[in-house]
């Protein structure tokens, strides 16, 4: 993931109780079962499809759905759902992680729709 998105990603993961890979992605994490960091996620959320092309490629091999925050110049091969975001700005990426986390918490009924 992008360095500007790492703090937002860590907070997103903490509030939703999800696993994250903030920083360098180890190739083979989704495809090589003999690797110590092997994991089988149900869905993959990436900050930038251009910089996170390796996890997207591996997710496509394993039929893992991919949600991506994508800029207008992003290649969407392997991406199932693209959320248009200015991935160059740290505030826009952080805002999108906040909005997505808030919506997931609302869908889980952890917070009410009336809460700001």
Image: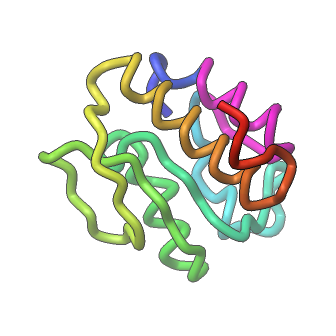
On the picture, is 37 further left or further right than 65? right
**Residue 54 located within the stretch drawn in magenta:** no
Quadrant of residue 92 within the rendered picture: top left
Whether 78 is drawn above or below 88: the answer is below
Query: Residue 30's spot in the image, x, y percent?
Result: 67, 64
Query: Residue 112's spot in the image, x, y percent?
Result: 78, 47
Query: Residue 72's spot in the image, x, y percent?
Result: 14, 47
Query: Residue 42's spot in the image, x, y percent?
Result: 72, 70
The rendered magenta stretch, by its main secondary structure, is classed as helix
Q: Residue at x 80, y 69 (%)?
A: 33
Q: Residue at x 40, y 67 (%)?
A: 81
Whether 91 is drawn above or below 13: the answer is above
Q: Nearer the viewer, residue 116 or 80?
A: 116
Whether 51 is drawn above or below 34: the answer is above
Quadrant of residue 13 within the rendered picture: top right
Residue furthest front in the image: 114
Count of labels shown?
A: 0
Q: Residue at x 38, y 67 (%)?
A: 79
**Residue 9 located within the stretch drawn in magenta:** yes
Residue furthest left in the image: 73
Q: Residue at x 66, y 41 (%)?
A: 102
On the picture, is 72 further left or further right than 110? left
Which quarter of the figure is the C terminus placed in? top right
Q: Nearer the viewer, residue 100 or 9?
A: 100
Q: Which residues are the magenta region? A: 7-22
Whether 97 is drawn above or below 92: the answer is below
Q: Nearer the viewer, residue 22 or 72?
A: 72
């Amino acid at each position: 993931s992008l360095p500007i998105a790492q703090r937002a990603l860590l907070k997103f993961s903490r509030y939703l109780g999800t696993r994250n890979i903030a920083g360098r992605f180890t190739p083979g994490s989704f495809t090589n079962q003999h690797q110590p960091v092997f994991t089988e996620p149900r869905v993959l959320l990436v900050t930038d499809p251009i910089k996170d092309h390796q996890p997207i490629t591996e997710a496509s091999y394993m039929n893992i759905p991919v949600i991506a925050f994508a800029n207008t110049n992003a290649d969407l091969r392997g991406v199932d759902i693209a959320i248009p975001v200015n991935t160059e700005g740290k505030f826009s990426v952080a805002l999108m992680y906040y909005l997505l986390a808030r919506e997931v918490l609302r869908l889980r009924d952890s917070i009410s729709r009336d809460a700001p």
